[in-house]
Image (tube, rainbow, N blue to C red):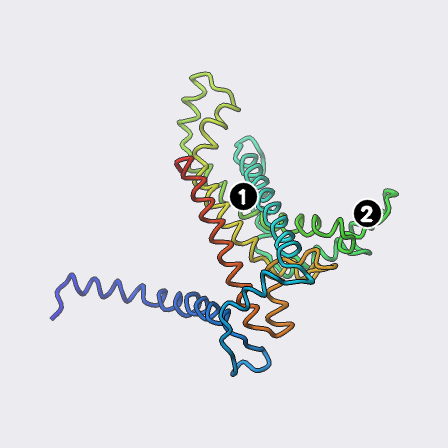
Amino acid sequence: MLDARKKKALRGLAFIAPLFIAIVLFLLYPMMYTIILSFRKIALVNISQSTFVGLENYKRLLTQKNPAFLSEIMRVTGVFVVSSVVLQVGFGLGLALLLHFHWLKGRNILRNLYLLPWVTPGIICGFAWKFMLDQYGILNYLFTLVGLPPQGWLTDLRLVLPSVIIANVWTGTTYSLLIQTAGLQSIPQELYDVALVDGASKFQSLTRITLPLLLPFLFINLVTETGDTFHVFDRIYALTGGGPLHKTELLSIFMFRNAFVYGDLGYGAAIAVFEFFIGILFAVAYLFIFRQEKV
């Protein structure tokens, strides 16, 4: 017979078993299988046959031409990720601070409105922005009403990347707003009251109380936003499909194109593994930086 302690432990294992099985089936197994595929040559049209090629897919990746992997794909991805993350975290923090003021009327309604971009599927957001930024879209129509010439937001090589960054920031800022709002609400009001009695200004309270206590939330925000932005696919694919001339071809779109359009699953898997480890490097870098700040 099992004693009470063992029965309690078995009940606990029974509760976590479904989650553990789900993690193994839907996270660990696909990840390990992708890593295995990255060392093999396998075509989508004949997935039953594959050949072990070692590091050949990774060598091909680093020497990729037309588009050049390092000078085009990684440059576009880097600009997109850094710009999106900085703007999303910055706007999210600014909105959270604004909506934290008790004198602002209707702030709960505004918070709910800001949730709309986050709960809307990415593919729908992409097509909505394409409808607005198209050559004959709403934005160019408004331009013509005020006497300005229409712009090729999604066709001009100079404007297309900033346009998709703005669309991505509009979608991702909501998540930053939620994280920073939670951080602000976790700060005791008594700290601000004491600072006010001591003669601290609003700016001093912001820099000496609010921002230091928000650092853990900023860390979580940066890690999750960077990971999400690195893997964004649907809204950018709906907007431009990676064009024109690879000017918006992110690493995720480059992986999709090679794996499922060109049918080279082994090469696509190598790109996915490379993307995964780049995300890990960013997370480690954030951890190192914030540890210096004693988060």
Per the image, label 1 sits on a secondary structure element best described as helix
Amino acid type, mark 2:
Leu
Query: In which quadrant of the rendered view does residue 135 lie?
Result: bottom right
Res. 142 mark: 2
Q: For the point 66% across and 55% down, which residue is it?
A: 72
Residue at the farthest right position: 147
Q: Quadrant of the C terminus?
A: top left
Q: Is residue 160 left or right of residue 210?
A: right
Per the image, label 2 sits on a secondary structure element best described as helix
Indicate whether 205 appears above or below 158.
above
Q: In which quarter of the image is the N terminus?
A: bottom left
Instruction: Measure the alpha-carbon separation of dots 1 and 2.
Output: 29 Å
Q: Where is residue 293 in the image (x, y as percent from the top left)?
A: 42, 35
Q: Position of residue 251 (x, y in %)?
A: 60, 59
Q: For the point 49% across and 57% down, which residue is it?
A: 277
The residue at which mark 1 appears reads as: 177
Q: For the point 57% across and 68% down, which residue is it?
A: 268
| Residue sitting nearer the eye, 284 or 173 | 284
Please rate how many residues cluster around mark 1, counting C-alpha atoms within 10 Å: few if below 14, some from 14 to 19, many from 20: many
Q: Position of residue 60 (x, y in %)?
A: 59, 65
Please rate how many residues cluster around mark 2, counting C-alpha atoms within 10 Å: few if below 14, some from 14 to 19, many from 20: few
Indicate whether 171 appears above or below 205.
below
| Residue sitting nearer the eye, 90 or 70 | 70
